[in-house]
């Protein structure tokens, strides 16, 4: 796992956008994994700027979302398909039907989850997966206690997650759906490159466990320690609990020019 500590979210967004740009220059038909939440927003804004400057195109790319609420109407503003369209995909040149998400309105949930797994596999797998992390260590909606071998499935959201997401639902945790469909930890780990962004002091404890703690289902993101190519990008506040923060800074500052993230 490579840990990169940068001064602020804007600097982090530029570095992550460089990863996307490099990938899509080399492989215009790459498969991208997209996350919702606040962590990736600055990255999406930077990618939009580069698209508008004709530096990057998504015209041949495909994308898969990490998760979706269960039971929200198709036009609900917080349905993740609508959120990702507002934040990113509707602002660039993805082709129609190139962006896929779990079907939170499905009548047969197990079949919808299996179909989503098949769709990812049929696309050849995800080349670059963008991630955030919850204050309790979840990635996607894999809450504490999730199986490290899990695949796309229905999950019940913890009270903490619903409180964290209440700001998107008028500040009311009870307005946040109780269930979601989410890629499993094993699904996420199948992507070829994982890039996780975390900023702010509220993520410091989760980041400490992610980077320096034991691998445990109680802190689901720790499974990333087993990934052959995982990159974690942090601002100083999110990195404040790391014992080896000085070393991570030294390693990044000393990287050879040819060695990319």
Image (spheres, rainbow, N blue to C red):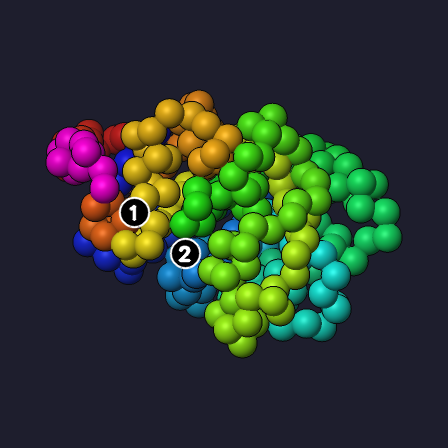
Residue matched to label 1: 204
**Spatial separation of the CA atoms under disc 1 and disc 2:** 14 Å
Q: Main secondary structure of the magenta part?
A: helix
Left or right: 111 with respect to 222? right
Q: Is residue 245 magenta?
A: yes
Few, some or many residues within 10 Å of mark 1 (<14, 14–19, 20+): many
Q: Is residue 212 above or below residue 73?
A: above
Query: Which residue is at 19% across, 33% downward?
Result: 243
Q: Is residue 225 magenta?
A: no
Indicate the secondary structure of the residue bearing disc 2.
Answer: loop
Q: Can see residue 24?
A: yes
Left or right: 4 with respect to 129? left
Few, some or many residues within 10 Å of mark 2 (<14, 14–19, 20+): many
Residue matched to label 2: 39
Q: Which residues are magenta?
A: 241-250
Pointer 1 with pointer 2, Cβ within 8 A: no
Left or right: 233 with respect to 39? left
Q: Is residue 160 above or below residue 241?
A: below
Query: Which residue is at 52% across, 39% downward?
Result: 144
Residue 20 on image: x %, y %: 43, 47
Q: Can see residue 98?
A: no
Using the image as rendered, state which of residue 159 and residue 194 is in the foreground.
159
Query: Which residue is at 77% across, 37% downward?
Result: 114
Q: Classify residue 210 by image quadrant.
A: top left
Residue 70 on image: x %, y %: 71, 56
Eye-nearest disc, 1 or 2: 1
Residue 242 on image: x %, y %: 22, 37
């Amino acid at each position: 796992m490579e840990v990169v500590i940068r001064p602020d979210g804007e600097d982090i967004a530029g570095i992550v956008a460089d990863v996307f740009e490099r990938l899509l220059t080399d492989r215009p038909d790459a498969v991208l994994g997209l996350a919702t939440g606040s962590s990736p927003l600055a990255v999406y804004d930077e990618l939009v700027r580069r698209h508008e400057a004709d530096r990057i195109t998504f015209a041949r790319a495909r994308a898969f979302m990490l998760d979706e609420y269960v039971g929200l109407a198709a036009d609900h503003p917080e349905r993740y398909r609508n959120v990702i369209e507002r934040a990113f995909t509707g602002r660039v040149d993805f082709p129609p039907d190139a962006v896929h998400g779990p079907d939170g309105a499905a009548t047969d949930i197990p079949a919808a989850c299996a179909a989503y797994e098949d769709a990812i596999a049929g696309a050849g797998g995800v080349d670059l997966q963008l991630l955030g992390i919850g204050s309790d260590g979840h990635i996607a909606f894999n809450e504490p206690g999730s199986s490290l071998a899990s695949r796309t499935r229905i999950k019940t959201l913890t009270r903490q997650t619903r409180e964290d997401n209440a700001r998107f639902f008028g500040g009311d945790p009870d307005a946040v759906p109780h269930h979601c469909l989410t890629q499993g930890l094993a699904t996420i780990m199948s992507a070829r490159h994982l890039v996780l962004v975390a900023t702010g002091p509220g993520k410091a404890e989760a980041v400490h466990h992610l980077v320096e703690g034991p691998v445990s289902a109680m802190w689901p993101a720790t499974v990333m320690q087993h990934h052959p190519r995982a990159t974690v990008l942090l601002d100083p506040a999110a990195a404040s609990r790391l014992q080896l923060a000085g070393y991570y800074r030294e390693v990044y500052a000393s990287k050879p020019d040819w060695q990319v993230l």
